[in-house]
Amino acid sequence: MQSQQQVLSINEIIYLFQTEEDEEKRLKLWFKHAFLKHFYSDQPIIIGDDIRHRITYDKNNQPIHSDDKKPISRNLTTNELFNAFLFNLSNKISSDIWNNNLSLRTIFYENLLPFETIINNCFHIFSSKQSEIATCIWVENKTFRNWFCGDITIGCDQSGREINYTIPDTQLLNHFILLLDTNKSSLASDMCKRNERLKFIVRSQPKDLCVALFVKILEQSVNNASLLKECLTWIKNEKVICELLLKINGSKLSHFIGFLNFQLQLLKKNNIKKPVISKDYPLVQPFISEINKGKTEDKEDVIPNNKRKADEEEDVITNKKSKVEENKVKASMMGFI
């Protein structure tokens, strides 16, 4: 006698999906049950009928049965949304949720959670293979982007004073390394452009760490002229260059040896004033034409020109408003207002 297969309810399937630790089993559930995609797209799903709505009572409190049914809907909670999204960053489920759930994107774009929470979640995203999601957040969330430039204002305390938040040196370096390790070279390049402090942090690292970091930069520069352009003048330590030459000799990065020798000679002459690439070294031919043209718009620029211009205009307006408010305060203190 064949045993009947247990039929799971919708709630049981949702619970199984949320608690299943095996990634392959979660993926099977995701593709097998279409309602999961609707549920995580922030669309209420019907999980049954409320039997209580089929019974009414007369004046003597006697039950009167009715065929009327009221469906029970199940709504997605914020915790369920975040847990499923972050738990599945290693597979396609997270990108499906991201692309189909406007609420999730709005939370990240408009900082609808505490900024510290946004930062922590973004660290998980940067650690993953979800380059498209990471780029979307980087482009759309100006506050998050500016955080990598230095100070940002995230609110006011009870006395009305602005609360400024500065990215620590260690955190800035860790995020930069993380972007290199996960092949997000376009974001790493844009981070270099936005924070002058980063190169000084890199230079201040111990020699071994500095060498390892520049190996990562060279690896990513193979496909990203913009990153190489930003980091050309970062190496100002002869010992670091000599160690780097030994490190890449005979490797797939050996085509950078001539270029590094050229930079080493410039260092010895103490003549580095600006990035230099000589046409005598074919090692960087894929990038020479791009860099020597002095282009301000690289192919790897992740921020669209129209958005960058809009951000700059917004900064100008904000600065003007701040100046007006400052003048009002001064006038008030002098008794003019």
Image: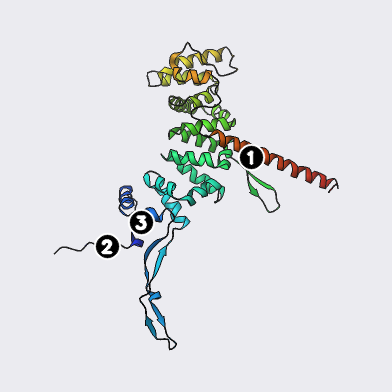
Q: Residue at position x 15%, y 63% from top?
A: 2
Q: Residues within 10 Å of mark 2 (few under 14, many from 20)?
A: few
Residue placed furthest toward the left: 1
For the residue labelled by badge 1, is the local secondary structure a helix, a strand or a loop? helix
Mark earlier in primary sequence (1, 3): 3
Where is residue 310, by image quadrant? top right
Q: Residues within 10 Å of mark 3 (few under 14, many from 20)?
A: some
Q: CA distance from mark 2 to mark 1?
A: 56 Å
Residue placed furthest toward the top: 280
Residue 314, label in figure: 1
Dot in front, 2 or 3: 3
For the residues labelled 1 and 3, say whether their Cβ atoms are less than 8 Å apart.
no
For the residues labelled 2 and 1, say whether their Cβ atoms are less than 8 Å apart.
no
Residue 94, label in figure: none
Residue 7, label in figure: 2
Residue 35, label in figure: 3
Where is residue 143, by image quadrant? top right
Q: Position of residue 254 (x, y in %)?
A: 40, 18
Front position in the image: 186 or 304: 304
Relative to 335, does residue 305 appear above or below in the rendering? above
Q: Position of residue 321 (x, y in %)?
A: 71, 43
Q: Position of residue 330 (x, y in %)?
A: 80, 44
Q: Is residue 31 left or right of residue 224?
A: left
- Residue type highlighted by circle 2: Val
Front position in the image: 313 or 266: 313
For the residue labelled by badge 2, is the local secondary structure a helix, a strand or a loop? loop
- Residue type highlighted by circle 1: Glu
Front position in the image: 78 or 197: 78
